[in-house]
Image: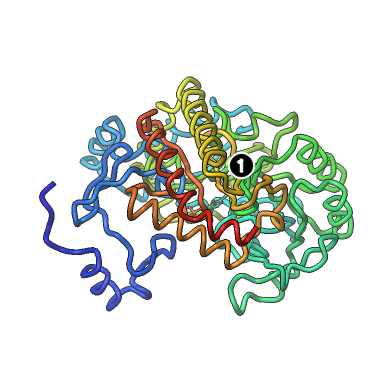
Amino acid sequence: MKTSGKTNKSVYDRACNVLTGGVSRNTIFREPHPYYVATAKGSYITDIEGVQRIDFANNMASLIHGHSHPAIIEAVTDQLQRGTAFTMGTEAEVNFAELMIERSGTFERMRFVNSGTEAVMTMIKTSRVYTKKSKVAKAEGTYHGTYDYAEASQTSNPDNWGDIDKPNVNQVVEGTPQGALDDVVIFPFNDIERTLKILDQHAEEIACVLIDPVPHRVGLFPATNAFIEAIYNWTRKNNALMVFDEVVTYRVNYGGKQDSFTVKPDLTAMGKMIGGGFPIGALAGRSDIMEVLDPRGKILRHPHSGTFSANPISTTAGRVAMELFDEEAVLNLNALTNTAIHQIEEAIKIADVPMSITGAGSMFRLHLQASKPTCYREAFQTKEKKDLTNELLDYMFLEENIIMINTGACMFATSLTQKEVDRLSGALLNGFKLIKPNLDKLS
Ligand SMILES: Cc1ncc(COP(=O)(O)O)c(C=O)c1O
């Protein structure tokens, strides 16, 4: 490829003069500088210095078909020529909502927003209006975006996480109002007994129990059906809602991870991949609850808008992406991911490293510990482990030209094939051997 003559470092130097820390999202930061994309197609990204890498991060799980899928480009190009945002509706949002409601058994009504953070925030506020209560219960360590209530205790660590029977509600950002933290209840994921005891202590005040059914930061392992049933039953008894954050996990089955459970959430927040590569969020669920957003109501109970909500670019791209991600595509992608997991487990054995791998559907995460973690506290990485993870990921990125997520996770796309999976497992084997001496010392 013809390169621009610019270097990643020179662009970063310019970026540092205008963007705080040289970046607009911390996710892309890496030492000594981030890398800048020139072009991307399918599962391959070429940076401005002409280096091509295989992409297993897919913009943090948001590109289910990889980069620049021709059908999405064609549909979006057509819409671009007819306008991008209006103070009017478009049929694009209706078409997309019809598709999603047909796809998922629990969706009766929907609203589109612009990000996963906004979808989760709208879901929490909708739950509060509906139940007339204010507290949110969430699992320790889960990431649900950056709304004050949704982010509490996302970064809890051994110094501040407190007793497992009553985990502390910790702020992520200094200056978070104590009032916000007082309205959050933290429970240990998948721990039925403790969670129910904790919820009982706040039964009168909990509006919703917020669940990511395969929480990445907790360790990327699924909620058990028994846990979900217990939460569901508790919410039925206590005038509370069970709400799912499927911003990432909607990919796991055709109708989201919720398809795997015997009971279903009242509301679901989505985002990332349902935008087909463009910014999106969505809230869907029971029509009697969603009604609080209805502008036709006598009282406007939850005035909800958003300048770019349901813009026709995101809803068109999203519709095409979801049409392509049909039942067969979901199964094929999950099968390819499963093959990758087996090959990596084999590499772990060959390299003889104390490591394990967890995941669901088309995603997995590596752990620098021999036994798979079963809770946030077990999955928590010490600074030494984080440094080793970074060493492995830097090796993958710089020497093997493979992009993974900074936790050691991969989020697959339908553009990947067995060829890229073989490259991934072969490269990881080399990486495991590289970190083995230091990893053995830690174990
Ligand atoms: C589970 C989950 N919920 C919500 C969000 C927030 O989504 P967004 O980055 O689109 O605001 C994320 C983002 O990574 C996520 O992983």
User: x, y percentage for residue 48?
Assistant: 20, 56
User: Hey, what amino acid is under mark 1?
Assistant: Thr
User: Which residue: 71% across, 31% down?
Assistant: 261
Is residue 81 left or right of 210 when viewed as pictured? left
Total count of labels: 1
Is residue 217 left or right of 137 when viewed as pictured? left
Q: Residue 111 versus residue 247: which sits nearer the camera?
A: 247
User: x, y percentage for residue 335?
Assistant: 51, 25
User: Which residue: 72% across, 73% down?
Assistant: 159
User: x, y percentage for residue 368?
Assistant: 59, 53
Quadrant of the image containing the C terminus: bottom right
Q: Which colour scheme appears in the figure?
A: rainbow
- Answer yes or no: disc 1 within 8 Å of ligand 1: no
Is residue 134 left or right of 410 when viewed as pictured? right
Mark 1 residue element: strand
65 above or below 195?
above
Q: Which of the 4 image quarters holds residue 413?
A: top left
Q: Residue 397 versus residue 100: which sits nearer the camera?
A: 397
348 above or below 101?
below
**Residue assigned mark 1:** 358
Disc 1 residue crowd, few under 14, some 14–19, many 20+, Cα 10 Å: some
Q: Residue 285 versus residue 24: which sits nearer the camera?
A: 24
User: Which residue: 87% across, 48% down?
Assistant: 193
Q: Which of the 4 image quarters holds residue 20?
A: bottom left
Is residue 76 left or right of 334 when viewed as pictured? left
User: Which residue: 68% across, 43% down?
Assistant: 289
User: x, y percentage for residue 296?
Assistant: 58, 45
